[in-house]
Amino acid sequence: MSWNRRRVLMAGGLAALSAIGRPARSAGVREPREARRIAFNNLHTPESLEVVYRHGEEYLPEALARLKTLLRDYRTGEEHPIDPALFDYLHDAARARGVDPVFSVISAYRSSRTNAMLHERSSGVASKSLHMEGRAIDVRLAGIDCASLADTALGLQRGGVGYYRQSNFVHLDTGRFRTWRG
């Protein structure tokens, strides 16, 4: 997959098309309290979770706590709060592709010990990874190939987008907008 100008424009077009048909937001008019639901299947544990994590602009603390547990460092059992904006990023990427936000998780939160071990084994693991801050996740989206998910996320221009073709996953994070291939 090449990250050329044409591909960036196509991804942006997909994101723009997903907004067609939505009513424009008027000043002083509040949108209905949309319930945002997301589902995860952790590929390293037998756990899965489907949960409403947000109503309108309000994140639901109980749901975020359940997500924190599911997305823990499976190697150490350590938990860390996950940036709620990451769930919005995933939710919006799935909706832009026209599918439900159902994700298989390869990696989410990583303890500093786990990250250091992975960094020693692979040049593809950043020593100061956003995984250690609960701001990054490596996923697959049900029903969508990873190249298409990466293109869609690229069009959203919200944070980091890493496409790992050989390993068949996409890294998304809530850091600054940037892109790479692994």
Image: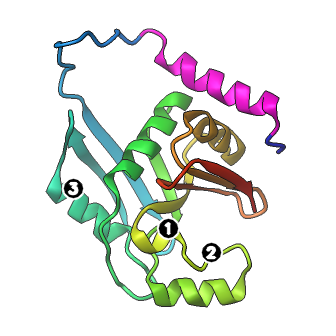
Q: Quadrant of the C terminus?
A: bottom right
Label 1 near label 2: C-beta < 8 Å?
Answer: yes
Range covered by the magenta-colored residues = 4-21
Left-right relation of 171 to 10: left
Q: Amino acid at mark 2?
A: Ala
Q: Residues within 10 Å of mark 1 (few under 14, many from 20)?
A: some
Q: CA distance from mark 3 to mark 2?
A: 29 Å
Q: Which residue is mark 2?
A: 126
Query: Does residue 24 appear in the picture of this structure?
Result: yes
Q: Which residue is mark 3?
A: 63
Q: Is residue 171 magenta?
A: no
Q: Which residue is mark 1?
A: 130
- Which of labels 3 and 2 is toward the front? 2
Q: Residues within 10 Å of mark 3 (few under 14, many from 20)?
A: some
Question: Is 166 located above or below residue 51 in the figure?
Answer: below
Q: How is the image coloured?
A: rainbow
SS for callout 1: helix
SS for callout 3: helix
Q: Quadrant of the N terminus?
A: top right
Q: CA distance from mark 3 to mark 1?
A: 22 Å
